[in-house]
Amino acid sequence: MKTQTKIAALFFFFSLFIMVLFGVSVYYFVNKYAFTDFYKRLEIRAVVAARSSLETEADKASVMREIRAQHLQKLPEEKEYIFRIETGKTFREEADRLNVPVSFFEQIKKTGAASWQQGNIFYSGIRYQAVDGIYLVVVSAENYYNTHHLAYIRNVILIAIIVTSIFALTLSVLFSRQVFNPVKKMTRRVQQIGSQNLHVRLDVPREKDEVGELAETFNNMLDRLETAFETQNNFISNASHELSTPLTTIIGEADLTLIRVRTPEEYIAALEVILKEAERLDDITKSLLFLAQTGFNGGTQKFEKLRADQLLYDAREMIDKINPNNNVQIDLSGIPDNPLKLKIKANRQLLDLALSNIITNACKYSRNKPVIMRVWAGEENVFISVTDHGIGIPENELRYIYDPFFRASNTGDFAGYGIGLPLTRNIMRIHKGEIRVSSTQNEGTTVTLVFPPWGAF
C-alpha cells in the first residue's frame, strides 16, 4: 500500500472513530436524560392522581382534576393504581397483577418513591398521606420518547455519521493528494535525471517545510554527484591529452639519444630535457590527482572555526615565499565592528591552497602589478575578493574558465596548466560556498569567494 493511501485511510478511520464516538456519546446521554425525564413525568402524574382522587376537600380535588385534564397530556397506555397501606399487607397480589416485583412496593413504603421498567412500560409510585390513611399511588405508561424521539435521534445520528464519513473520505483523499503532490512532482523530476543531465535540479518551494528541505538536500547531493562526474570525465578526457605530451617528449628524447653513442655533453642535454618534462609530468599528475580528490572526497574533510581576515594574512605570507617580487596589498576597510561576523567554518589547508592559486594567478597575469585582497561581511555571507590589473579574460571565454586545462587565448606568454580555477571551485563547493569571477580584457580580473557564515554550514 502506498504511503498516500495509508495516510488517507488513517485520516478517514480516525475521523470515523471520532464521529462514531461522538454520536454514541450524544445518544447515550440523551437516552439517559429521556429516561429520567419520563420517570419525572410519571411521578408528577402520580401526585396529581393522588390529590385528585384522595383529597377530601371537593374544591381542591376539582382543581387538580381540571389541571390534569387541561395541562397533562394523557400518555400512551397510561394507567393509575391506588393501594391503601394496611398493617400486615405485603402487596404480593398487587405486584403480580401489575407484573412488578414486590420490592417495588416495599421501596415506595420505605423511601416514599420508586420507579420500575418492564420492557417499554415504565412505572412510578409514591407514598401519599391522606386524611383517612396512607396510600401507595402507582402510575404506568408506555415511554413514547424511547419509541419515537430517541429512534428519530438515532436515525439522525446514523445519517449524520454516513454523510460525514463520505465527506471525511473525500477530504482525506484530497488532503493526501495535496500533501503528496510535491513529492510526486519531485519523483517525476528525479526519474528524468540521469548521468547525461546531472545539471537538472528540483524546484525548491518557497515555504521552508520538510518537502523544501528534501528538495534542497537532493539538490546538494546532485551538486556533489555532478562535481564527481565532471571531475571524472575531465580527468579521463584531459589526462591522456596533457600527459601524452611530456611522455612523448621523454620517450622521443630517450630514443634519439640511444640511436648512437653520444658525448657526455649531449647525454647531459638529453637528461636535462627528460628531467624537465618529467617534472612537468609530475606537476600535472599531482594537480589532476588533487583535483580528483576535491571532487570525490570533499565530504571527508575536517573543518574548524576561522576568521576570514586571518586567511588573507596566511595567504600573503605564502605568496611572499613563492614570489618575493609580488605586490599584494590587504584592504581591511570592510571589516565589520563585530568580528564574529567574519567567522566561517573552513578547512585551512584547502582554503590556503585556493587563495594561493587565485593570488598567484593575479600576480602572474598582471606581471606583479598591485593586487588588492579585501574581506567583508554581508547580511548573510562572508566575502573575500582578489582584484588584479592584468590581462583579463576575453568576455566570450569566461564560460569556459572552470573547464580543467582550459587557458584563455591571451595567456600564451604565461606558463600554466588551467587547473587553478576548477580546483578552487571544487574547494568552495566543499565549503558550501561559491566563486564569482568578473573580468575585462586588458583591464583586470576580480575573483570573489562567498562563504556561508558560521552556524549556517
Image (tube, helix red, strand yellow):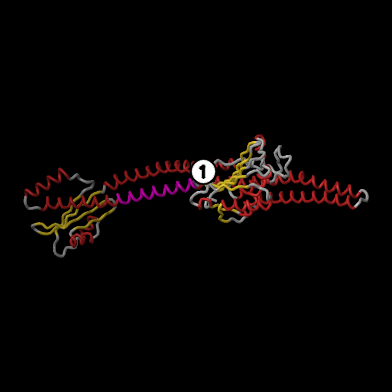
Pick out the residue farthest to the bottom.
88
Does the magenta portion include 25?
A: yes
Does the magenta portion include 292?
A: no
117 and 394: which is toward the camera: 394
Q: Which residue is located at x 21 percent, y 51 percent?
A: 42
Residue type of the residue flagged with mark 1:
Phe
Q: Which residue is located at x 25 percent, y 48 percent?
A: 142
Q: Where is residue 156 shown, x and y percent of the image?
A: 34, 43
The picture quadrant where one finds residue 71 is top left
Does residue 302 appear in the picture of this structure?
Answer: yes
Residue annotated with mark 1: 180
Would you place residue 100 above or below residue 255 in this image? below
Q: Where is residue 108 shown, x and y percent of the image?
A: 19, 59
Q: Main secondary structure of the magenta part?
A: helix
Rate crowding at label 1 as few (under 14), some (14 to 19) or many (20 or more) other CA atoms within 10 Å: some
What is the magenta range? 7-30
Q: Which residue is located at x 58 percent, y 53 percent?
A: 310
The picture quadrant where one finds residue 303 is bottom right
In the picture, measured across the screen, residue 103 lies left or right of residue 51, that is: right
In the picture, measured across the screen, residue 409 lies left or right of residue 255, that is: left
384 and 75: which is toward the camera: 384
Does residue 229 appear in the picture of this structure?
Answer: no
The picture quadrant where one finds residue 188 is top right
Q: Where is residue 47 shown, x and y percent of the image?
A: 15, 52
Q: Secondary structure at mark 1?
A: helix
